[in-house]
């Protein structure tokens, strides 16, 4: 609990995972909504709604995953630097 209050323990990686799953759900719902309203959207769009729905269903979750992984890299870098820092602190002999 002390690490959490001192901001040494990050909660953002867990939040990013939640946002990933929410993003996947949004992509699936949007793709299905486009697919179910394809007759209405066909007149308004030059791109076939079926193709748009498939792209949202396939490419959408992939892009959400890539974005979340890029955010997670920042926290992995921090954790690695923190581990290096802690290992160096343990290896340094006390000053005389």
Image: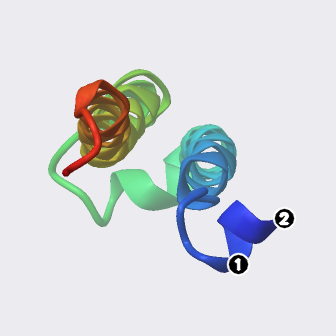
Whether residue 21 appears in this view of the structure is: yes
Camera-nearest residue between 84 and 23: 84
Whether residue 49 appears in this view of the structure is: no
As helix, strand or loop, the secondary structure at mark 2 comes to loop
Q: Position of residue 17 (x, y in %)?
A: 62, 42
Which residue lies most toward the front here? 96
For the point 33% across and 42% down, which residue is it?
82
Q: Which residue is mark 2?
A: 1
CB under 8 Å between discs 2 and 1: yes
Which corner quadrant of the image does residue 87 belong to? top left
Q: Which residue is mark 1?
A: 5
**Which mark, by number, is residue 13?**
none
Which residue lies most toward the bottom here? 5
Category of crowding for the residue at label 2, using alpha-carbon neighbours closer than 10 angstroms: few (below 14), some (14–19), many (at least 20): few
Left or right of 30? Residue 53 is left
Which corner quadrant of the image does residue 1 belong to? bottom right
Which residue lies most toward the right here? 1
Q: CA distance from mark 2 to mark 1?
A: 6 Å
As helix, strand or loop, the secondary structure at mark 1 comes to helix
Q: How many marks?
A: 2
């Amino acid at each position: 609990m002390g690490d959490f209050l001192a901001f040494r323990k990050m909660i953002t990686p867990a939040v990013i995972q939640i946002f990933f799953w929410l993003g996947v759900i949004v992509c699936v719902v949007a793709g299905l909504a486009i697919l179910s309203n394809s007759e209405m959207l066909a007149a308004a769009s030059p791109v076939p709604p079926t193709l748009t729905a498939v792209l949202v269903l396939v490419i959408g979750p992939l892009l959400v995953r890539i974005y979340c992984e890029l955010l997670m890299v920042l926290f992995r870098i921090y954790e690695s630097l923190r581990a290096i820092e802690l290992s160096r602190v343990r290896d340094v002999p006390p000053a005389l």
